[in-house]
Structure formats: C-alpha cells, structure tokens
C-alpha cells in the first residue's frame, strides 16, 4: 500500500479533529495556569524540549514575547543531567514540551526546576507520562495516538495548545476567535497543491528553509522533516540570520523554501525573496493564491499566528509526496524510533 494512504499521511489528516477536541481538554488547565501566572507574574519563561517539540517551543517563544512582552529562553537540559547544576528559577515559569513525556533529560530538568521554585508546566500528549507526573500543571495536547515516527499531528496540536495558552494569558479575543476557525483552515491547508516543488526538491541533496516571526518555527520543523522523512539535508534560518553568511550558498544547487509570515515580518522577507530571485536562487515562496512560478499556495490570511500553523500542514502533505518520489519510508525513517530517550 502507498504511504500516501497510511501512517503519517493519515495522522496529519487527523490534525483538525485534534485541534477541535483540544479546546475542551485544555480549558480548565489553562484557566488554572493563567490564574497562577496572574497572581504571581514571572519575569521570564524557560522552555525545555527536543526535536519537533523544540520547534514548538520556538513558536511559543514568539507568542509569549510578542503578545505578553515576557522574555523566553530555551533551557540546556545537560545543565541538570550532566553538570548537576540547579538554576535560580524561583517564581518563574518553566514549560516543558514533549509528545511522549519520557525523555530522561526533560524529566530531570523539570524536577530540578520545580525544586528550584519554578512553576513547572508540562505540555504533553501522554498525560500519565513521567514528565507530567513531575510537573505542577499538565497541558494535554489531546492529539490522540500517533504511531508514525515523524511527529506531525502532535506538532500541530502543540502549536494550537501554545496558541490557546497565549490567547488566555494575554486575554486576546482576536486570537481566540482565530483559534475557533483553525480546525477548518487546517483541513483546507491539507489540500493545497505544492506539487510545483516536487521535481526540483526530489533531485537535490541539500536545501534551505527560511522563516521569521511566527514562521521561523515552521521553517525549522520543515527542515527536520526533510531529513527525517525524505533523506534530504536541509538547514533552517531566520530571514535576517540568512544574510549573515549563509546567503553565500545561494545558487541553483541549493533550493530555498521560504515560509512567508502574514504579519509585519512579511515585509522584510518579501524584500529578501526579491533579492534571492535577482541572485538566481531556486526559490519557492508560500503566497496566498493558486501557486505557480515558484509560488506555493497558501490560504488567504486570517490571523498571522494561526496562518503559520496552516503552512506546516500544507508542508506535511508535500513531505509525504516527496518521500514517495524519493523512495523513502515516511513512516519509519532509518535509525529513528518513536520515543527518543536522551540524558
């Protein structure tokens, strides 16, 4: 049976229902968390995650800094697991993100953070996992079972859970309304045609992904999925960072996939896209419309943060087709397993 009809492809089509179902599951724990954050506001947020979940944490960083003005940093788990150092985290927010909740380094760091006085929160798909047990508050992704090694449904669910947290914490009615529309938009994004990129990407060995603002996390996740599912090397950059050296790579040898944000960050990336075309880049850019001429179709803009979630859903559909074209097993990438335990 074709991989188009099993595993990852099926699970990504389940994402809209997961996002819809999540609204009920997250309502009470987010109310509890927001209440505690309002009573004792943190000065900063520390995230801890690995792999795909680390890209979700990047998205959370954008949301919290953009909507709440609170600095967010990524933890280095080995500070706790290798070096045995306790950080000064009294009254700060610690947010661990993990689909399985079973990676030893995240569990140990969460335990250290809680001991150090942080409000320890676990965003997990498995609410009975050791990471959930080690935390003060559990935010369920509510994605349901995900068997494919490459996480898709749980990534989308993590992004929507972070959006719900940001909307509740910032009391942002506009973002909450966009979340109500998100399940239908994710379903629509799944059906957009990105086949214009297939011939070019299937014949290459390396490429670049670019994003900024809400789409930086999307570019990073796409880069990982190219590696995991298509045996295709990819590097992700912010639009600004790309100009600080990596722009020297620009040629027809290295295709560029640019995830265009629909907020203020879009102006700079549109300028970058024009410059890359002048330099002769093999460039694909997400744009509202029907695609063609290096454009990959995106939904009409609704809300910049939820628009970014729709882009990764369209990308996942492309990844399934690209893996089939390149002859890789999208559901069982070589050398990988579903739960990766590091320390």
Image (cartoon, rainbow, N blue to C red):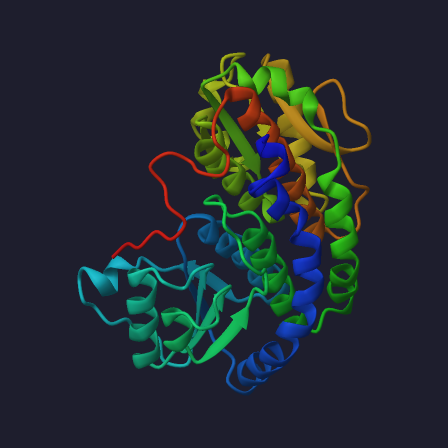
Q: Is residue 131 visible?
A: yes
Which of the pair 175/137 is nearer the observer? 137
Residue located at (74% from left, 42% from top): 189
Q: Measured from the top left, where is residue 300 in percent x and y? A: 82, 42
Q: Measured from the top left, where is residue 40 in percent x and y? A: 50, 85
Determine which quarter of the picture holds residue 195. top right
Q: Measured from the top left, where is residue 57 in percent x and y? A: 49, 56
Q: Is residue 216 positioned above or below 92 on the image?
A: above
Rendered-image quadrant of the N terminus: top right
Q: Is residue 258 visible?
A: no
Q: Measured from the top left, where is residue 17 in percent x and y? A: 70, 58
- Counting the numbered discs, the total is 0
Residue located at (55% from left, 55% from top): 154
Determine which quarter of the picture holds residue 320. top right
Looking at this view, name the residue that lies furthest to the bottom. Answer: 39
Residue located at (59% from left, 65% from top): 142
Rendered-image quadrant of the C terminus: bottom left
Residue 260 lies left or right of residue 153; in this view the side is right
Residue located at (50% from left, 41% from top): 220
Q: Is residue 56 positioned above or below 270 on the image?
A: below
């Amino acid at each position: 049976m074709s991989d188009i009809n099993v595993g990852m492809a099926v699970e990504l089509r389940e994402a809209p229902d997961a996002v819809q179902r999540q609204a009920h599951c997250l309502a009470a724990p987010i109310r509890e968390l927001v209440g505690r954050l309002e009573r004792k506001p943190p000065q900063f947020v520390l995230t801890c995650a690995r792999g795909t979940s680390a890209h979700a944490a990047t998205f959370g960083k954008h949301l919290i800094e953009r909507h709440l003005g609170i600095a967010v940093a990524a933890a280095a788990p080995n500070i706790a697991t290798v070096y045995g150092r306790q950080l000064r985290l009294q009254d700060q927010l610690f947010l661990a993100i993990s689909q399985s909740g079973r990676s030893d380094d995240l569990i140990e760091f969460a335990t250290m953070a809680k001991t150090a006085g942080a409000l320890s929160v676990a965003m997990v798909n498995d609410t009975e996992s050791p990471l959930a047990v080690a935390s003060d508050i559990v935010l369920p992704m509510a994605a349901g079972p995900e068997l494919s090694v490459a996480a898709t449904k749980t990534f989308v669910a993590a992004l929507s859970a972070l959006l719900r947290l940001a909307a509740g914490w910032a009391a942002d009615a506009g973002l909450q309304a966009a979340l109500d529309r998100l399940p239908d938009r994710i379903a629509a994004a799944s059906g957009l045609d990105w086949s214009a990129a297939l011939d070019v990407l299937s014949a290459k060995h390396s490429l670049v992904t670019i994003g900024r603002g809400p789409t930086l996390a999307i570019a990073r996740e796409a880069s990982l999925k190219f590696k995991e599912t298509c045996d295709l090397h990819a590097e992700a950059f912010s639009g600004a960072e790309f100009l600080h050296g990596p722009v020297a790579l620009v040629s027809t040898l290295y295709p560029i996939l640019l995830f265009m944000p629909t907020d203020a960050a879009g102006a700079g990336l549109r300028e970058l896209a024009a410059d890359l075309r002048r330099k002769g880049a093999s460039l694909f850019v997400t744009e509202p419309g029907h695609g063609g001429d290096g454009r990959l179709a995106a939904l009409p803009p609704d809300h910049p943060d939820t628009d970014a979630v729709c882009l990764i859903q369209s990308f996942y559909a492309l990844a399934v087709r690209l893996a089939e074209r390149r002859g890789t097993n999208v559901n069982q990438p070589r050398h990988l397993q579903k739960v990766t335990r590091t320390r």
